[in-house]
Amino acid sequence: MNRPALLASLLVPLLLTTGCAHRLAAAPPPVSGYIGNYEAVRAAQDDPARGISGTFAMSVQAVGSDGGRIYLNSERDYRHPLNITLSMDAALRPALEDALGLKLDYLQNRRLLVGGTARRVRIDFINASGQPSGKYYYQTQISVSDPRQVRFAP
């Protein structure tokens, strides 16, 4: 095989696959003295029963809701392995917005400090009849039950 053909046969698959690679959201450097995404996810996986407790630093990349719950995610794709999800009852929304002085929908790209426990939570995919499909993934979540758990990072 000649050199240009060999080079093309190696480069074409490489170029095609790099466009499909997932890229993390451009996150600011970690806030010193707080638990970051990687450490939180790793600790929650290492000890799923207890997780890791402390103050977590995260940048909100997505806000969502489902079934009376609100979710603030540190990655645009909530299924990403390094995502941290803040999970809270929708009834907490007005109090949290008052505490932060900002609507939750405007938190994207804002850095937060969150007190609590990060735990690994199994998320089941639901089929068309509303039953678990047998497929699932794990997500690292911090449950927020009090607006005082959340504040803006310096």
Image (spheres, rainbow, N blue to C red):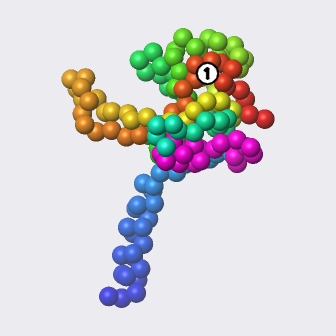
Q: Is residue 113 left or right of residue 154?
A: left
Quadrant of the rendered structure where residue 34 is? top right
Q: In the rendered view, tell whether residue 31 sits above or below residue 117.
A: below
In percent of width and height, residue 127 lies at 24, 29
**Residue in view at x 64 percent, y 12 percent:** 95
Residue kind at label 1, given as amino acid type: Leu
Quadrant of the rendered structure where residue 139 is? top left
Q: In the rendered view, tell whether residue 125 sits above or below residue 102.
A: below
* Residue 32 visible here: yes
Residue farthest toward the bottom in the current orientation of the protein: 2
In percent of width and height, residue 104 lies at 61, 21
Question: Is residue 32 located in the magenta-colored stretch of the structure?
Answer: yes
- In the picture, the quarter occupied by the C terminus is top right
**Residue in view at x 69 percent, y 46 percent:** 30
In percent of width and height, residue 79 lies at 44, 40
Residue assigned mark 1: 104
Question: Is residue 17 located in the magenta-colored stretch of the structure?
Answer: no
Q: In the rendered view, tell whether residue 6 sits above or below residue 28.
A: below
Q: Which residues are magenta?
A: 29-46
Q: Is residue 1 left or right of residue 148?
A: left
**Residue in view at x 32 percent, y 88 percent:** 1
Q: In the image shown, does 116 or 15 lie closer to the viewer? A: 116
Q: In the image shown, does 5 or 91 lie closer to the viewer? A: 91
* Residue 82 visible here: no
In percent of width and height, residue 4 lies at 40, 83
Mark 1, secondary structure of its residue: helix
**Residue in view at x 39 percent, y 35 percent:** 122
Q: Is residue 106 left or right of residue 47?
A: right
